[in-house]
Amino acid sequence: MSEKIIPVIMAGGKGTRLWPLSRASAPKQFIQFVGDRTLFQATLERVSDSTAYEAPIVITNEDFRFLVAEQAREFGIELSGVLLEPSARNTAPAVAAAAAYALKKFGDGATIQVLASDHEIIADEHYTKAIQVAYKTARAGKLVTFGIAPTEPATGYGYIEVGASLPAGANSVKRFVEKPDAANAKKMLDAGGFVWNSGIFMFGAQQVLEEIRELAPAVATAAVEAIEKAKGDLDFIRLDAEAFDKAPNISIDYAVMEKTKNAAVVPASFTWSDMGSWDAVWKLGSQDASGNVVLGETTLIDTRNSLVFSRHSHLAVQGLEGVAVIASEDAVYVGRLEDSQNVGALVKHLASAKSTAALTQTHPTSYRPWGGYTSILNGDRFQVKRLFVTPGKKLSLQKHHHRSEHWICVKGTAEVTVGDEIKIVRENESVYIPQGEVHRLANPGKIMLEMIEVQTGSYLGEDDIIRIVDEFGRG
């Protein structure tokens, strides 16, 4: 039995409210917004103290498994397990599966802390104290949630009305309140005694599983069976699809926290944001003298209190106030910061049109277990990509039926297999891959390898890849 906290990190969400940077295939938890880490890596850092925490359990899906593994490796964090959900079933089944896995791995006394992978938190002394209070309260048999002291009448968060004090320093829960309109949010802020519902939890794994069995039995049955029948795949644990798919699609708040008599809340004053809008990113960013937060190549004149991000082009903004201007490689969003909670409605509109649906799903930059690629130019019977390969990694041994490829090395050193020949390709050198020829690209060096790939042929889709040998287990 472990006396340490077992972190459970939810990393499977596909939210698009931070479009155009965040998309279904590249969601916000794996993107750098502020600082030199992704939100997922910042979450890993908060649970990296081995005196207090066991190695984390991560729950994600098939599409993000290599992103999880690579970003944890890049940050030097060992994981207790990466659970792959076969389908999206909200947070109650995910918590139940994680609790069952924690009991199996760490024993009956396991205490788990459930964290979202896409929150921005300043882990100061207020945060540390809240964790200590939550741990003591959870060990006393309570199901604990963290309540954040509100700083404004926000309408994007749920609220909790705080009840009587409990022995370990937490409080009972009077009631949960749905996301309010502006008038009700102001009333709660003026009245006091309300906190934002952070979506962070702490409870005994056995305790929460028993509560789920009582209050949402179909969730518990499906999740436990999915763990019992799970299969290992490289460093991942695949939950049994037939069992897990039977779980109702319901949140842990609705399934348990709003019904249980054992709910407790730890009111806390640490800095927290769910990074659910561009307005939230602006508030947490480093503002200049004019209140602007900028990233990338930008020029601002007579512009105040704005967020300006560019991933590709040079952005020039003049004479505006309180706006978000966000440019990815293939799309630009411009809107008032105060309206940024409604970006989701815009994304739904884009997704409903055939001509723009792809802009909500895929990103020009795609990540793979070996690195990734960025689409630079597409034309009739040709396309150009920038490949980047992590040191020590290699692509699968593969061939294409419908295209040939020309690779130019622009940074680093490449080891290229073409048929039976292996050659070293250095900066400013190139190699040709004939259509149908078996080939492989590897990075034997110490720095990131960058290649420009020019594809030509009758069909250039990603599904024209016949993998012969793949160290990542892909077909």
Image (cartoon, grey):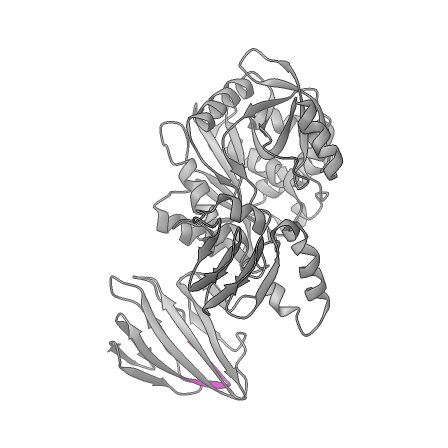
Residue 170 quadrant: top right
Residue 294 quadrant: bottom left
Residue 78 quadrant: top left
Q: Nearer the viewer, residue 8 or 127?
A: 127
Residue at 67% across / 46% down in the picture?
89
Q: Residue furthest top?
A: 167
Q: Is residue 332 visible?
A: yes
Q: Nearer the viewer, residue 109 or 166?
A: 166
Decide if residue 340 is on the left or right side of residue 408: right
* Above or below, 328 relative to 242: below
Q: Is residue 400 magenta?
A: yes
* Above or below, 186 relative to 438: above
Decide if residue 123 is on the left or right side of residue 443: right
Task: Give the residues in magenta.
Answer: 398-405
Residue at 42% across / 61% down in the picture?
296
Q: Nearer the viewer, residue 316 or 226?
A: 316
* Above or below, 343 relative to 105: below
Tag count: 0
* Above or below, 195 relative to 90: above
Q: Position of residue 169 (x, y in %)?
A: 54, 15
Which is the main secondary structure of the residues drawn in magenta?
A: strand
Q: Position of residue 350 (x, y in %)?
A: 68, 66
Q: Is residue 399 visible?
A: no
Q: Position of residue 260 (x, y in %)?
A: 70, 24
Residue at 50% across / 84% down in the picture?
401
Q: Quadrant of the N terminus?
A: top left
Q: Position of residue 433 (x, y in %)?
A: 38, 84
